[in-house]
Image (cartoon, grey):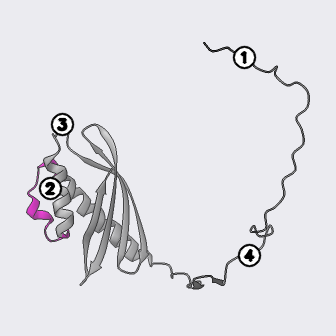
Amino acid sequence: MTTLQALPEPRTGPLPVVLVRRSRYEPEPGANWAPQETAAGPVPAAVPPVPPDQHAEAHQRAAAALRLALEVLDGRRAEAHLADIAAPAVLRYWRAARDQRRMRSPAQLKAMRVCLPAPGAAEVAAVCAIDGRVRALAARFERRGGRWRCTAVRLG
């Protein structure tokens, strides 16, 4: 048998003053802090920004490829249409996803963000509507020989 204990009375009056001290690892306000060297060695220089035309091209190619991939997922297109723009591992992933799915409504690409972390590489985060559910999709595209090719994909 357990016994119930009464809750303490609510505190009334002013709250206590709490002092916050700055930790040693925090830079002073307004300081331009950037490490010049770490335990692993010198910090690499920042990657130069990608020209807007390359970003626009990557966004356009990725959007077209993902729309095509969603049509393959629905069964509206043949898997062979992805062969030129997707790596074999991506094709296997889409085949498995298509085989596990019972289509209730066509899949749609709702929103997409593209990041270019390195020259010739694009990482995509997308929002898709699949069978009445909102799902996340992540993909990586690499540019080889002037063509963008999907090298990795995950559907959340």
45 relative position to 63: left or right: right
SS category of the residue bearing label 1: loop
Q: Earlier in the sequence, mark 1 or mark 4?
A: 1
Residue at image position (31%, 66%) is 60
Q: Amino acid at mark 4?
A: Asn
Q: Earlier in the sequence, mark 3 or mark 4?
A: 4
CB under 8 Å between discs 1 and 3: no
Measure the C-alpha gap from mark 2 to mark 3.
Answer: 18 Å
In the depicted view, which residue is nearer to us: 6 or 90?
6
Q: Earlier in the sequence, mark 2 or mark 3?
A: 2
Measure the C-alpha gap from mark 1 to mark 3.
Answer: 54 Å
Q: Amino acid at mark 3?
A: Arg
Which x, y percent locates residue 70? 21, 53
Front disc: 4 or 2: 2
Residue at image position (39%, 76%) is 53
Q: Amino acid at mark 1?
A: Gln
Q: Which numbered circle lies on residue 32?
A: 4
Measure the C-alpha gap from mark 1 to mark 2.
Answer: 59 Å
In the depicted view, which residue is nearer to us: 37 or 139?
37
SS category of the residue bearing label 2: helix
What residue sits right under mark 2 in the picture?
95
Q: Which numbered circle lies on residue 5?
A: 1
CB under 8 Å between discs 4 and 2: no
Residue at image position (74%, 69%) is 25
Q: Earlier in the sequence, mark 1 or mark 3?
A: 1
What residue sits right under mark 3 in the picture?
104
- Image quadrant in which you'd find residue 58: bottom left
SS category of the residue bearing label 3: loop
Q: Amino acid at mark 2?
A: Arg
